[in-house]
Image (cartoon, helix red, strand yellow):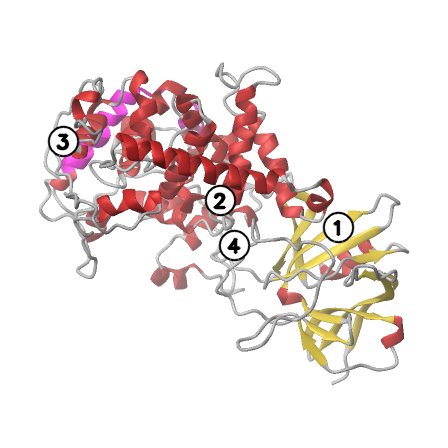
Amino acid sequence: MQPKMIFEKEGVYLHTNAKKGSLDTSMPGFIRIVERAGVPALEWSPLQDEAGSTPAVFYTKKDGEEDTNFDPGYEPDWAVISTVKKDRECVPVKVSGQWSFSLPLSELYSLRRARFSFGRNFLVLTSRGGHPLPPLHFHRGGTRELLRALHHYIILDPSPVDGRLFLAYPHDSGALSQSFDKLQLCDDGSSDLVSRFIQDPYATTFSGFSKVTNFFRVALRPPELHSHSRSANDPGMPQQSDDEPGFELITCGVELGPRPNVTRGPPLDKWKDFLDPEGRVKNPEIIKKLVFRGGIIPSLRNEVWKFLLGFYPWNSTAKEREDILLAKTDEYFRMKVQWKSVSEEQEMRNSLLRGYRSLIERDVSRTDRHNTFFSGNDNPGLTLLHDVLMTYCMYNFDLGYVQGMSDLLSPLLFVTQNEVESFWCLTGFMELVHQNFEESQEAMKQQLLQLNSQDSGSLCFCFRWLLIWFKREFSFEDILTLWEVLWSRLPCDNFHLLIACSILQSQRGELIGSDHDFNTILKHINELTMRLDLQSVLCGAEAIYLQLIQCKELPLKVQQVLGLYVPSSSEESSPDSQANETQHLLGLSPAGAAAASNSVPTYP
């Protein structure tokens, strides 16, 4: 079958710069979209190769092969950000001759459009294997025409962190495989669902609720129910429904006993009494129970938070903590130097890193500005917030920066008043919630399902609650208390879900049995922000937990959420794991370290 020419443009120069000192750094040629056996591909070939072709070679390294000598002349989009499905089997980019290439459009991951200072357009293509191609310079224009031709085969969606970066998606992406930022809930063309839920969950939900409902009902519904959601006209599309979703009382099929009354206790107000002569915490479980029961007084938070978030092991001595701080300080500034030393020229060729910096700067400028630590212009607190988030991109190349992380950092920085300590506390916090920020949003889907296995579409307003652990729902001071309670990991790891249940329970009269329509209910939920009583919510969540664990016929799924059921294949942690943790942080051999007990806390 003869190849079918879809698009062709002459005067497209490929920037090689493969060998330093070479004067010939650009090569004229043709850019084409060609269909071969029905498979569209983007191809470039130089003018001198038009008469013939040479055997294909590959950019991608295969098992047992040596690395190729391809050098685009600049640092590719390095692993600071580009971690697209590492385990994916890469389809190689074919290269005919020295520089010609053919890239199937199904393997195009991103396209960055930019201009040189003298006004010539150029494109940088990246394959789904993470391999950047040399920049293509459009000396005679034509980028718009190329983009229009590409739109016949793929969706080019502007990145939320860089308006010049376009992410490629196939036209037939189903709802289940789309990430949240592809839902296109709003009519303004914005694709950043996470940021819109953070800023205004009511407006986001209200303006695009039909799409949210459709997504959750298809993507979050158990697989066996999907077959009933197909349209007769198009079996590949989920069935649309014009019915307005409502709230109803759903029973779990088992008898729950009476809900007990719960009272809160005083905050932890003593610390040295719990330390032995060498500075070890004598009984961490008592500390955790006290924190869960009443929180921590402000003067002790700076010390206790470092243990709750794993910066210091519970059994470390005062001397060991000094050594850990020195080692972690050195490690932090080595990572900070990595991004501080990137020149403007390097950053110009690293669109994702530049995009993260832009997003961080934008978020920092509007994070907790009402707090004196971050208020005003040229505030050093804002500089620390920016620097810690940039350094986290170096620490966690896979995740980088996602909107909402500044909300997690600001209370840590406020309490520690220290750049290094707040950074390592952030890494500990992110160990608990990092899955919330992953592109697939699978963790968020799972949590919404755990809240309501019937139809999570009705609980879409809980998205922001779970994403940043209620940061925008309570006052700044209340969040400090709530988070330290959750960090105790008592009475179960998913206590934050019970917090959400407690909030919903407190609003039961508005949600069930009222004559309000769904939009009015959504507006009511959104207006709860800063009006919730934290102590009442905590008491309600604990009461729900106690009521559930007293049920003898609790469904297995609920037991798993509450941590009451552990699969038989799971293994208990070794008794000396806690002692080894200190040695690991210090980079020392665990040999000779005293074993410490790692008893499981009991509750209540």
Q: Which mark is residue 395?
A: 2
State the separation of the CA atoms marked 2 and 1.
28 Å
Q: Is residue 529 visible?
A: no
Left or right of residue 118: residue 43 = left
Report the mark closest to the observer, 2 or 3.
2
For label 2, the SS is: helix
Q: Earlier in the sequence, mark 4 or mark 3?
A: 4
Q: Earlier in the sequence, mark 3 or mark 1?
A: 1
Neighbour tally class for label 2: few under 14, some 14-19, many 20 plus, Cα within 10 Å: some
Q: In this orientation, which residue lies closer to the viewer: 174 or 390?
A: 390
According to the picture, the residue beneath numbered tag 4 turns out to be 178
Image quadrant in which the C terminus is located? top left
**Residue at the spot x=63%, y=66% of the render?**
106
Neighbour tally class for label 4: few under 14, some 14-19, many 20 plus, Cα within 10 Å: some
According to the picture, the residue beneath numbered tag 3 turns out to be 259
**Residue 502, how many percent across, how many down?**
27, 31
